[in-house]
Image (cartoon, rainbow, N blue to C red):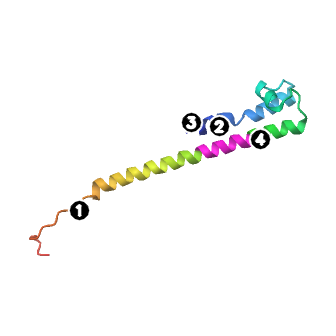
Amino acid sequence: MLIETAMSLAAPWPLKVVLDSVFASRPLPAFLVWLLGTSSPDPFTFLFAIVGATVTIALLQAAGAYINEYYAAGIGQRIAHDLRQSVYGSPCPTTTGSKSGR
């Protein structure tokens, strides 16, 4: 759940970088300069980095959602199992001489 939340917060970041660096002519963030190796990359390298960041964020968000659903389903199954065991788990004691005549 923490990964999914972090990736939901990071999802708008690539658009911010594009808007700031392309339209507002602000410098690239320091870690992106380090990653690309230059402070003014050509447009295709910049586009490749931003698309890669978007895809990575989406994949991490999907993986976080899958892990969250997997564990939530497992917990639900264990709760249902424990409830069934507590309600139906022990068989009723049978008596040899019942009064109902069966």
Q: Which circle marks residue 91 in the picture?
A: 1
Region of the chain picked out in magenta, as a range:
54-64
Q: Say if 28 sits above or below 54 in the image.
A: above
Say few, some or many: other residues with alpha carbon within 10 Å of mark 4 (under 14 / 14 to 19 / 20 or more). few
Q: Which circle marks residue 7 in the picture?
A: 2
Q: Which circle marks residue 52 in the picture?
A: 4
Instruction: Please tell me which residue is depicted at 76% across the width and 35% down the height of the picture.
Output: 14
Kind of residue indicated by mark 2:
Met
Kind of residue indicated by mark 4:
Gly
Taking the image as shown, residue 64 lies to the left or right of residue 32, namely left
Q: Say if 62 sits above or below 99 in the image.
A: above
Tell whether label 2 touches label 4 (CB within 8 Å): no
Say few, some or many: other residues with alpha carbon within 10 Å of mark 1 (under 14 / 14 to 19 / 20 or more). few
Kind of residue indicated by mark 3:
Leu
Q: Secondary structure at mark 4?
A: helix
Sequence-wise, the earlier of marks 3 and 1 is 3
Between the residue at mark 2 and the residue at mark 3, the CA separation in whole angstroms equals 9 Å
Instruction: Please tell me which residue is depicted at 65% across the width and 42% down the height of the picture.
Output: 60
Tell whether label 1 touches label 3 (CB within 8 Å): no
Sequence-wise, the earlier of marks 4 and 2 is 2
Q: Which residue is mark 3?
A: 2
Q: Secondary structure at mark 3?
A: helix
Between the residue at mark 2 and the residue at mark 1, the CA separation in whole angstroms equals 49 Å
Kind of residue indicated by mark 1:
Pro
Tell whether label 1 touches label 2 (CB within 8 Å): no
Taking the image as shown, residue 29 lies to the left or right of residue 92, namely right
Sequence-wise, the earlier of marks 2 and 1 is 2
Say few, some or many: other residues with alpha carbon within 10 Å of mark 3 (under 14 / 14 to 19 / 20 or more). few
